[in-house]
Image: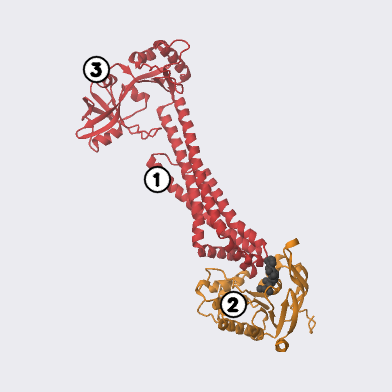
Chain colours: A orange, B red
Amino acid sequence: MSADGQPALIELRQVTKTYGQGQAAFQALAGIDLSIERGEFVAVMGPSGSGKSTAMNIIGCLDTLSSGSYRFCGVPVETLTRDQCARLRRSYLGFVFQGFNLLRRTSALENVELPLLYRGESAATRARLAREALADVGLSGWEQHTSAELSGGQQQRVAIARAIVTRPAVLLADEPTGNLDTQRSREIMELIKRLNTERGITVVMVTHEPDMAAMARRIVHFIDGRIAADASASDAAALARARA
Amino acid sequence: MLWNTLLLAAREIRRNLMRSALTMLGIVIGVAAVVTMVTLGNGATASVAAQIASLGSNLILVMPGQRMGRPTSGSVAPNLRLSDADAIDTQITGVERVSPVVSKSVTAVVGAKNWKTSVTGAGNTYLGVARWELVNGREFSEAEERGGKSVCIIGDRVRRELFGSSDPLGSELRLQSFSCQVIGLLKAKGQGSMGNDQDDFVLIPLRTAQRRLAGNTDVNMVMVSARDGASTERIKERITLLMRERRNVREGQDDNFNVLDTKQISDTLSGTMQILTLLLGAVAAVSLLVGGIGIMNIMLVSVTERTREVGIRLAIGALEREVLLQFLVEAVTLSAVGGLLGILLATVASITLSQFMDLPYSFDVGINLLAFVFSAAIGVAFGYTPAKRAARLNPIEALRHE
Ligand SMILES: Nc1ncnc2c1ncn2[C@@H]1O[C@H](COP(=O)(O)OP(=O)(O)O)[C@@H](O)[C@H]1O
Ligand SMILES: [Mg+2]
């Protein structure tokens, strides 16, 4: 519960995730407690294989958890049907992947329109909102280009436009700059930062770069499927300095 | 939602033109092959049936030789004689007309043109028995038949080959060592049941043929038409008895001649036609299968891409049934369009080939429907199944698919 009595936006309690069965079983998440409020900007860090993506996928309702509970706005997600999860995704969540995951041979505009189409928006509304979203990520004039004709940075911006075109409550980004050079990474980071400050979109973002993480207000550290540290960015920076 | 789904399916088809085209091609080829083959087979069967009908149901043929289908016993069967024909005519009841026939392969010459054809030596009765009609000129006169005069009636093919567009009546035609005058022209019958051209022959009086071509008084075949209402079976039995006696076939020995009626001929031929149609059908079924495997291949190759596509759609909030419906619409559209194109192609091909092969054409609803449904089922099964499997996964599993 947050201070004003409303349930937290995202609330994970003792969440575990086990891949495989029997001998081959592997516990990727070993009991996570995490609660995120509206409007937060959370950076998720940790060595590779520590369960960051697993946690993100569970938060994004793209994957199921093995035990524990996940409440989104107080709703127990693990009790939802597949269709209810899909509706939750299309209404409240925007996901940005490391590998972009755009539809191939499809124009930027059509890619961005897609979530609106599944929400049943009219063609005119779709086109207007998709153009606006592409403008928001600085891709005006690139509407008709397919992913093959766009650079990595541009593709990731199309993916972000697709994630925010439905005006989601939460933007989940799993290493959104992982495939980009420093310059492009910075642009994407600034874009995400602006979405958080100007639109009030809650952002949860996985990153390896400390200076990217420093733009967040809160940093969560994963190690071996557990949360090793969870602190405000300034504390985290102090912590990092102290360690150095 | 349905409209949006149609839109999505149309977009995917357009976007993956190559895949769509190849899938459709598989269906087009499968459907077209099956439908064409079976249609042609049907046409051939109908043509044979029509040929036999044109011979008449009351025709009986008597030919020298061992009983069909038995091993030859070494000795050559003697030819028939003119007196055999007379005997059949006078001694057997129920017989309407008897036409002894001599035939020989000869090169006919008119001016500088020559044409290898077959000469039939027979009387006017032949025209009635074999159901020929004159379009021009006249039949033989009695004097011409009896005197073995040098006159002839020609088939339409012979007219075309030797006279072209000029009028053949009254012209001279050279057959081997003698020439004869054209006095009549027969109405065209078209291709025969064995693929032969029935119109490719010259008719001369029996006696003329015996004297001028054969040099003996033998007869190659006796054609007998039964009177309306008379039993052909009974007549055949009587002819057999009579011929055994006349040809001195001893008791216990096999006949050295054949007595056939059109029903037997038609049975033999339609048996052959059935085997032929079956064979064509088998070839066509193989091509349908090959088409199906082609579709399968294309679909399986794109499973990874399609699975990821499903993952993307699910991840951005598509419902499982929305994704499935899109894939179903896609597969059904491709299959249906492919099937219709296949039917169209088959129709064009069947009509063209039928014309070329001189076969009657008719649209067979059953085989069109069958081929269409079968290939459509393959198309839908292989287009839809990967999507079905992918849509059951968690979105993240579908996205991770490789
Ligand atoms: N589908 C899967 N099947 C089996 N093991 C998996 C699967 N996905 C991830 N893992 C394992 O779970 C652990 C955590 O993975 P992940 O959450 O992707 O880590 P991170 O994103 O922090 O690098 C890793 O050891 C990984 O090998
Ligand atoms: Mg990861």
- As displayed, is residue B114 above or below residue B7? above
Amino acid residing under circle 3: Gly
**Label 1 C-beta lies within 8 Å of the nearest ligand 1 atom:** no
Q: Amino acid at mark 2?
A: Ala
The tag earlier along the polypeptide, 3 or 1, is 3
Chain on which label 1 sits: B
Q: Which residue is mark 2?
A: A161
Q: Nearer the viewer, mark 1 or mark 2?
A: 2
The answer for how far apart the CA atoms under marks 2 and 3 are is 105 Å
Residue B26 image position (x, y, % from top left): 50, 53
The residue wearing badge 3 is: B147
Residue B263, image x and y in percent? 46, 26
* Quarter of the rendered structure image containing ligand 2: bottom right
Total of numbered circles in the picture?
3
Element type at mark 3:
helix
Residue B207 position, x and y percent, is 27, 18
Q: Going 53% across and 43% down the picture, which residue do you hit?
A: B366
Residue hosting label 1 = B352
SS class of the residue under badge 1?
A: helix
Judged left or right of residue B82, residue B242 is right
Contact, CB < 8 Å: mark 2 with mark 3?
A: no
Numbered label attached to residue A191: none
Question: How far apart are labels 1 and 2 at the CA level?
Answer: 57 Å
